[in-house]
Image (cartoon, rainbow, N blue to C red):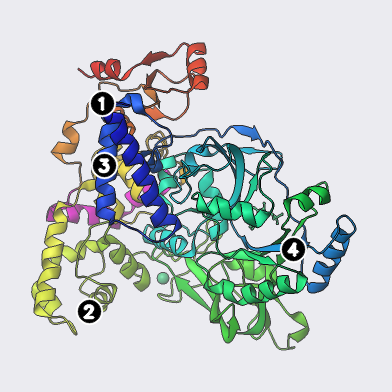
Amino acid sequence: MDSKAQTIEKLRADLHRFNYEYYTLDNASISDYEFDLKLKELEQLEKDNPQFFDANSPTQRVGGELTKNFVTRVHKNRMYSLDNSYSKEDLLDWEKRILKLVEGPIEYTCELKYDGASINITYKEGKLVKAVTRGDGVQGDDVTTNIKTIRSLPLTLQEPFLDSFEIRGEIILPLKGFQKMNEERATAGEELYANPRNTASGSLKLQDSVEVAKRPLDCLLYQVVSDDRRFESHSEILSKARSVGFKVPKTLTVAKNIDEVLDFVSLWDEKRHDLPYETDGIVIKVNSLRMQEEIGFTAKAPKWAIAYKFKTEQQATLLNEITYQVGRTGAITPVANLEPVHLGGTTVRKASLHNADQIEKLDIRIGDTVLVEKGGEIIPKIVGVDFSKRSQNTSKTIYATNCPECGTSLIRTDGDAKHYCPNEFGCAPQITGRIQHFISRKAMDIDGLGGETVDLLRKENLINTYADLYELKYEDIVRLDRMAEKSAQNVINGIEKSKEIPFEKVLFALGIRFVGETVAKKLAKHFKNIKALMNASFEALVSVDEIGDRIAQSVVSFSQDELNIQLIDRMESYGVQLSLSAEALENQTDLLKGKTFVVSGVFHKLSRTELKKTIEDNGAKVSSSISKKTDFIVAGDNMGPAKLEKATKLEIQILNEDEFLAMLQ
Ligand code: AMP
Ligand code: ZN
């Protein structure tokens, strides 16, 4: 083998192992920094030596492929569902049924029932080749590109296992990662994800694998399917799978009889609250693979396995009061204030009531005994009212008509579940919230100004809008409670420095509803300055790639508001960046204006991201799928055959990387 190839192979093997140590064993042997260096080295070598491309290289973890339509694939072996049980009696009945089919004693495996999205992954000759969702059990969607970004899942096995096999598991989103994602959504003023399970399964169907790579997904394996008959038992095959690099949770236990199964159930009914991810029960399987074969399947589930569902935790408690919370964007959330009650390992005092419809639907009244549940959601919810306990003198809940903070009449637009306080500029939590968003790290990044300080400054009437920040004097700040001289100076410096923050971040900082980080970037790039953006019509806005009605409407109403116009004028006078920098503009031309490109395959001179950016910088649009509207395809190595066929059929011009670059000369 050529020595370059050897170096590449060695780096790949090392990086696969480091990934494994870090994400599967949770025991890293090198620092993040060293890891990054090695990864960069490999990236460079692969770029310089494209002949050694490997779809399973550790460099492929970052994603890059777009999937417009997920291809449906038939499972080689059907993916069954599981029958449920809820009690010891159910389990004993189940054992009785099996004992009619095979001779006892029967040994069982007990596993946790991981709550996520099921996946079926095919390996051939030690390499991951395909990953398909469960779908209806017979066929599912091919999500291979997205699945490959999950760091704990081996792309290449460390040791020989079976030649060809399917391994099944659950794609989950650990609680910590889920909370972090929601914190980021909250900062961007976006609606929060409801629960880890739906978010995990939604992630698998994202079109942009780069986005998937950013999500902290994990894959827990629970079954190997193969024609090879060298293994005796389910526990044996899973422990072998674990030793070749798969994340098979160590909670798996072998039980000699149903009593031991019940011990496992009662242990985990408590301990599951300490796990870093959610579970919704236990799965019990007959351990011997021969027995499993003899016992067989019903039309929808294996007879040799059963799920034991944990009781969803529900408690009855008294509803003392309903209060209303006002968010940064003015959205109102009704909150149930409860008589404290113990639930799922914590004391619950508050539960979300979501919106007016929810209260109406459940007919919840103050003084009611309500049922609180802690299910998949992080915030407990109220699932019903115990009407038998309702006293005579309750009265129907009348939803708040005015803002609890500023007294303004609430509004609710058609099709919106939430009420809003429209008093954007005069409602305390909205003012503070908006300024806090403005100064946050991903926005204007003004250090030293915490949430409390913002609130103090507002109470002193020193700031009411983000523009007021730029009028603040050192003397205003230093006389605040507990403010040291040095800190006050830091705040002033931070505000001054924020005048260098680029336009796209300023646009995000303005806190226009539905304009998150990505949308702000798109709009900044397209309109180039704030004046052009604020003068844009609804039609002009929706014609921008990926800008929908909702965003366009929000930008239009922001731009028409006299107060916003004044604020922006003031920001301009302070020297805040309200247009793209000369440097950003310099690389932009109209050379490819009006054209639509599709990018496919692997490139050498530019990365995919750079290539797309170059196309967009020169005025053209990048689309993810080939259609009649496509003008050019830039094709690298390994362009998919389906795409090639479609392009030929539609007679679309295909350019290689050099031909594309020549167009820009
Ligand atoms: P259900 O969807 O309720 O029919 O339950 C079947 C699903 O449970 C399977 O499709 C798996 O995705 C999931 N599951 C989670 N953990 C396990 C496990 N340890 N063994 C088998 N299935 C599991
Ligand atoms: Zn208000």
Asked whether mark 1 lies closer than 8 Å to ligand 1, one says no
Q: Is residue 572 magenta?
A: yes
Q: Which tag is nearer the camera, tag 4 or tag 3? A: 4
Q: CA distance from mark 1 to mark 3?
A: 16 Å
**Mark 4 residue type:** Glu
Quadrant location of the N terminus in the rendered image: top left
* Residue 621, image quadrant: top left
Vertically, is 627 above or below 387?
above
Mark 4 and mark 1: Cα distance apart in space: 58 Å
CA gap, disc 1 to disc 2? 57 Å
Q: Residues within 10 Å of mark 4 (few under 14, many from 20)?
A: some
Q: Which mark identifies residue 460?
A: 2
Mark before the other along the chain sequence, 1 or 2 = 2
Image quadrant containing the C terminus = top left
Frontmost of labels 1 and 3 is 3
Q: Position of residue 268 (x, y in %)?
A: 62, 73
Say which residue label 1 marks. Answer: 605
Name the amino acid, label 3.
Lys
- The kind of residue on which mark 1 rests is Lys
Residue drawn 66% across the image and 40% down it: 228
> In the rendered structure, which segment of residues is drawn in magenta?
551-577
The residue carrying mark 4 is 107
Q: Which mark is residue 40?
A: 3
Disc 3 on helix, strand or loop? helix
The residue closer to the viewer here, 318 or 323, is 318
Helix, strand or loop under label 2: loop
For residue 570: magenta?
A: yes
Front position in the image: 39 or 180? 39
